Amino acid sequence: MIRFDKISKVYNDGTEALKNVSLTIPDEQLVVIIGPSGCGKTTLMKMINRLETPTSGEVYVDGKAVSSLDPVELRKTIGYVIQRIGLFPHMTIEKNASLVPNLKGWSKEKTAKRIRELMVMVGLDPKQYLVKYPLELSGGQQQRIGVVRALAGNPEIVLMDEPFSALDPISREQLQMETKSLQEKIKKTIVFVTHDMDEALKIADRIVVMKSGEIEQIGTPSELIENPINEFVKNFIGIERINRKRAVGKREIQEFNCFFEQEKQSPCLEVDASMLLEEAIALLEDGAATCLLVKKADEKLGYVTQSILLRAMLAKEEVV
């Protein structure tokens, strides 16, 4: 478990990167930290392996304060994948991937077995690729090797800092899917920094949304989609994205445009257009009314019945 306890970071120029941040990252989860540029997400992540030092507060890994640990030894136990990969061009892929196991004193047999297993997991044939040099590989293949290298020493924690942002869309989507699939197999604690909300929603077990050095909301992808805590989170996720990914029943009835003009049944209740579809159906099921008059501010949008709403829900599900 990783725990940030009241972390603040102020740089020499007075920039306040983090403001009293407290956060717990559970074991064996892929946690994405996301937010606009300059929000402090990368600074927060780098404190786990002591690439950044807090001005105040403490970071704990498995109950131990990282400030009390030797930074070199600490980094041997934490995998790290960055955007620019950093493979050594004069070394073969096998030698690049063997760096941490060699530093940890593993035998050649144990190292070779581990690397070959990981190569298969990321979809690269060991016989074909381990003898190659980084410049002989595509960007997507190099990034896969970056993942193999980060996992080669069998760390319990892996940090991934915008690892796929420089890739073309197809390679990026493939690696996102492979990362999610890989995590289901290896069950590591992965802290993943990105500015891409679609990426976060696709791969994360939990998402930490940051703004101006503070945490705005923490939740699963579905929790963020269903209940964004404030306007910043809602706008950062994007209204269209929320509507696209939200469960049909969680959408507002005004989205369905299924109203008829004349009241055909009574009694009829007046409701706001922002009411969720599932709430509207439940209201009609209670028998308090047989139809609803839907209004947006002072504008009358029209009337709906339970059967109309159910048909609209089914139609929407088919489209989605």
Image: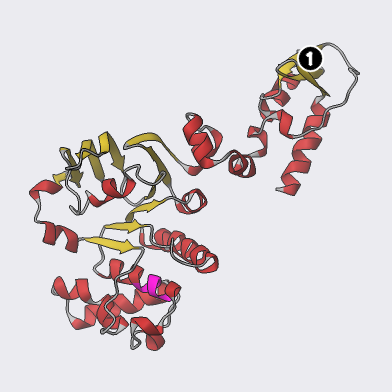
Label 1 neighbour load within 10 Å: few <14, some 14-19, many 20+: some
Q: Which residue is mark 1?
A: 289
The range drawn in magenta is 141-145
Measured as percent of width and height from the top left, residue 96 is found at 27, 78
**From what the image shows, is residue 236 above or below residue 230?**
below
Outermost residue toward the front?
13
Q: For the point 17% across and 79% down, which residue is it?
A: 107
Dominant secondary structure of the residues highlighted in magenta in the image:
helix
Quadrant in the rendering for residue 209? top left
Q: In the image, 309: left or right of 278?
A: right
Outermost residue toward the top?
267
Magenta stretch holds residue 142: yes
Q: For the point 29% across and 85% down, which residue is it?
A: 92
Measured as percent of width and height from the top left, residue 17 is found at 27, 40
Which residue occupies the foreground of this view, 139 or 33? 139
Measured as percent of width and height from the top left, residue 284 is found at 75, 20
Q: In the image, 162: left or right of 100?
A: right
Q: For the point 41% across and 81% down, which residue is it?
A: 137
Which residue occupies the foreground of this view, 166 or 59? 166
Q: In the image, 17: left or right of 300?
A: left
Magenta stretch holds residue 41: no
**From what the image shows, is residue 218 above or below residue 108?**
above
**From what the image shows, is residue 303 above or below residue 96?**
above
**From what the image shows, is residue 166 above or below residue 116?**
above
Tag 1: amino acid: Ala
Measured as percent of width and height from the top left, residue 301 is found at 80, 23
Dot 1 lies on which element? loop
Which residue occupies the foreground of this view, 153 or 301? 301
